[in-house]
Image (tube, grey):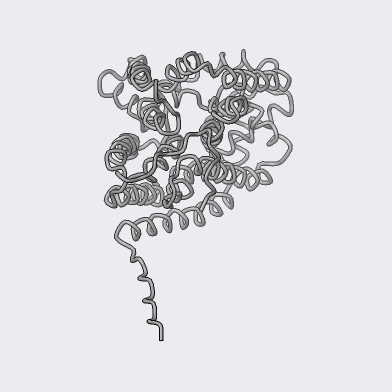
Amino acid sequence: MAPRKAAPKRQRGDYADALMGLACGLVAVTAFLFIPSMMSHAPGSRDYIVYWATGQQLLHHGNPYDAQAMGALEHAWGVKTGAFYMRNPPWTLPLAAPLGLVSANAGTIPWTLFLLAVTLAAVWIVWPVVRIPGTKVVWIGYFSPLAINAVVAGQTPVFALLGLALFLRLYRTRPFAAGAGLALCMVKPHLLLACVPAFLLWIVLEKTWRVLLGFVTAMAASCALTEWIDPAAWRQYLDWARHSGIAHEKIACLSVALRDLIRPSADWLTYVPAGVACVWGLVYYWQRRREWEWVNRGGLAILVSLLAAPYCFPWDQCLGIPALLFAGARTRSRLALAAIALAYIALDVQQLCGIQVRSPIWLWAAPFWVGWFLWARATERSSEPAPAPASAEPVPVS
């Protein structure tokens, strides 16, 4: 009688797995609590109302930067005081234009579900090119409290996240499409400043002109659509920007904290970290230009850009998801994975406690992502296979 084979031992989870599960559960609870709750309140309780009011103005050939008209629309749906505007550049106005076709109540659910779908699509697109076989830390992307924060607020950085994901997935195999996708990052162009010098030099040295052509084509199409919808948009935006006063706002980002610490009236100080980051990005690329791949080298540049951005809300940091996925898939340190799970829990608790996004309590997050990324990269698996180049066929998602 043949000896009976021993049953394979079940691999037991550890503290990192437990914390990952807790972090994912809390983010899921937050989504299920906040999204239906926010949508049941007056639309004016979310940033969504700004995009809806902008769509209304565009549809009725009004000025989306008119304080009186925008204020009247927003106050009717729950905004208490003042008037709020889309701060994105005019080429993003077409994103809000469809909201002009519906009432504020009718548009809130489709807009929220659309933002959620964009977020999930971005993670699904980028995961195959940042993962390595045998790793399943995709939860870092799907359950990001920063992305959920953006969706709950009705904010737009998830479009930039989608553009970044498309670029990382396609820049070697379909360069024109990658460049066109990258144009979505121009929804918030100030968030990736440290990457710009490296990107331009990479275009020249690698002769990846089709990426640049795709980017320019997409931007030209977006600008042409804006011109068709509202020919005066550029002048109206510049007039508003000159008197908006947003440069004096106190928000939870390093550049503003630096300005307020040194000299609150010196607005130029908010651009110093971004300038330093641009110089660093150029040097960082130049030293690694011979083996440069945006998938494995660009992650740190993305996170440094977010850290040094002159204007960055906590939800804008969801652009760092591809970098966190890349590092999380490669670290052998269970402690590092436990640390990012704890960070997610902390962010989620802050949101559940109702801490305002302008509070300095949020300041710790951007430096943490940079430090955690360096930690995770320093503890990479020594025996892991080399990551497949972006030009290879993506590995199916497990």
Depth order, front residue of 24/181: 181
Image point (45%, 27%), residue name: 191
Q: Position of residue 368 (x, y in %)?
A: 30, 38
Residue furthest front in the image = 1
Name which quarter of the figure residue 321 lies in. top left
Q: From this viewpoint, is residue 81 visible?
A: no
Image point (58%, 39%), residue name: 48
Image point (37%, 82%), residue name: 3
Q: Quadrant of the N terminus?
A: bottom left
Residue furthest bottom in the image = 1
Horizontally, is 68 left or right of 291 in the view?
right
Name which quarter of the figure residue 284 lies in. top left
Depth order, front residue of 392/69: 392
Horizontally, is 136 left or right of 73 in the view?
left
Depth order, front residue of 119/335: 335
Task: Give the answer, above or below, for where 131 lies relative to 258.
Answer: below
Q: Position of residue 257 (x, y in %)?
A: 31, 27
Q: From this viewpoint, is residue 391 visible?
A: yes
Q: Position of residue 298 (x, y in %)?
A: 41, 29
Task: Give the answer, above or below, for where 95 lies relative to 42.
Answer: above
Name which quarter of the figure residue 7 lies in. bottom left
How many discs mark residues in the rendered view? 0
Q: Position of residue 74 (x, y in %)?
A: 60, 35
